[in-house]
Amino acid sequence: MRFDQAAIREIHARTDIASFIAQYVPLRKRGNDLVGLCPFHNEKTPSFHVHPDRGFFKCFGCGVAGDVISFVQRREGVPFGEAVRLLAARAGVQLEPETPQAARMRSERETIFEANRLAAAFFVRTLSSDVGKTARAYLQRRSLSAQTVQRFGLGYAPSAWDALVRELEGNAIDLRIAAKAGLVKPKESGGFYDFYRDRLMIPTYSTTGEVIAFGGRALGDAEPKYLNTATTPVYTKGRHLFALNVARRAAQREAAFIVVEGYLDCIALHQAGFENAVASLGTSFTQEQASELRKYAEHAFLCFDGDAAGSAAATKAVEIASKVLEHAGSSVRVVLLPPGADPDSYVREHGSQGFRALLESAKPAIEFRLDPEIDRLRDGFSSPAAIARKAEELIRAMTPREEWDRWRVYVAGRLKVNPDDLRNSRFLTNRANFSPRTDVAGSRYTPVRPAARGAVEPRSFEREIISIIFEEPALAHEFAQRIHPSNLRNEEYRRIYERILNDAARDTTSAEVLTLFAQDAAALRVLAAEGSRDRSSSARFGGSEERRALLERIVERIEHEEVERRYRELRSRIDEAFTAGEPISDELRKESEMLVSKLRK
């Protein structure tokens, strides 16, 4: 069976060959390579080399070499198709057999990829030529180094009407397909002309390495400022992200992306050391783009221009990202730029440290959404009781139920009222009156109902716990006293965690964990999913110390949730006493104040 070559490329892009082979062969660093004893012949001196950056292995003893697919073929003794299927399942890549129709489509796609590659190379050469002088001067004004220009493949489209047409014709590219790629346009009189003229050219790459689109920036006052590739057979507008091909590894290290609007904003951040930056490619941030980011990191910083348009874009992006990234917004933070600033100008003026300070002070998405509503509440109501009542409605409409108490403390602090005033507002005390059907904007909504037993969606930290101890089971024993199974709400994840804990002293490898669940199909599905989430946890967390650091952060979160749980329990007792007209003891008041103090930290 033939497979779509795009799927094969995607398998290579999503599979870290070093981490994969390290499951079979102990490897150690030597220069830019990893070396170990060859698994294909007996040897005492390591001659087996893995080249992570180039995606292949080679044994200098027996001469065997190849990519990750050929490694699986040899190691597992399976044919090519079976090796592809095994790796595709691990990497989460959908495989389809290549039908004649699919073969024709692939041929067209491959021609577009080749046309884009030739165009990108042509633009790079032109930038270095005499006609690229103006474009080079523009890049110097933007303070972009030669290394940055080379890294991002920046080029220049000359002002001639047929320069690229002649280049593509000279390389036997069908200009009708080049037109489908958005590189040239047909003339009414016949023939074709260049779509991009007198513009700085910025290529966009897929995660598998192909040039899929271009952005052409005017060097003067020409309009529009940017000409972007429209949807083509290899590029869907609103789905891809600029620089994801180079940012995803840094995002895995940082556990977060920085999302900006413009190409040059993104490039400037990379030059300043923020290599986890991506750009939304001239479109509003979309759900598809958020889903793409979610494959590599669960957290995102949204950084848009400090003007009215940037604020509106940030508001929309927060809503979209919060739906895709978890915890209803707690995984999303908003970077607030001064009025009139953009990421490029800010990092040039204030440097890397200045921009990092902005990241550290970024607002959680929920806070960003709440603040304008709080300001309206403060300006629109004079009665403290009315403010408390509307604030409680706001919290219930805009925040997750399990975080209501946390956000009561925040909102009450902004409104300069007591958190108890929100909880005990007349609107809530009289349960007969509490049946809100609209949110603060007047939109209909359905009250949240508890999920059915066993159907609770695992929270991200539950998945991280399973991913980490699957990769390094010894950490289960190390954290057993601090992360109790009861801390996991999802029954399946809790059951798997308990089982691994019971065997933590014996199971030291992922393979041994899989053996433990050999007869448990449900658990194996969970472990397979966590082990194959686009880029494995071993790739996301480079070693034991990074895994241990994340577990420490998870412990902090669990402890914070325990404080919130105790606070809710205490407030329930105070509410009951309040409703019954009974006095509230000093002991309850003191503990309540202590818990509020902890929640504010």
Image (spheres, rainbow, N blue to C red):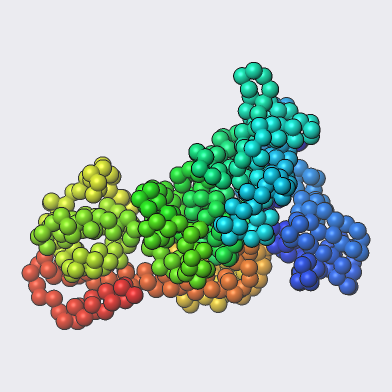
Q: Which residue is drawn at 80% across and 48% down?
A: 78
At which x and y percent is residue 457? 44, 54
Q: Is residue 307 left or right of residue 214?
A: left
Question: Residue extending furthest top?
Answer: 189
At which x and y percent is residue 116? 69, 39
Q: Which residue is drawn at 9% across and 60% down?
A: 383
**Picture mark count:** 0
At which x and y percent is residue 355? 48, 66
Q: Which residue is drawn at 61% across and 73% down?
A: 544
Where, quadrant-wise, is the C terminus in this rendering? bottom left
Question: Residue extending furthest right?
Answer: 62
The answer to which of 8 and 138 lies nearer the viewer is 138
Whether 292 is drawn above or below 586: the answer is: above
Whether 27 is drawn above or below 57: the answer is: below
At which x and y percent is residue 520? 59, 55
Q: Is residue 383 left or right of residue 534?
A: left
Q: Residue at x 68, y 22 (%)?
A: 191
Whether 122 is drawn above or below 580: the answer is: above
Where, quadrant-wise, is the N terminus in this rendering? top right
Tell me where residue 558 sits by quadrant. bottom left
The answer to which of 547 and 155 lies nearer the viewer is 155
The answer to which of 392 and 153 lies nearer the viewer is 153
Tell me where residue 114 sits by quadrant. top right
Tell me where residue 431 sits by quadrant. bottom left
Residue 4 visible? The answer is no
Whether 102 is drawn above or below 261: the answer is: above
The answer to which of 307 and 585 lies nearer the viewer is 307
Residue 596 visible? The answer is yes
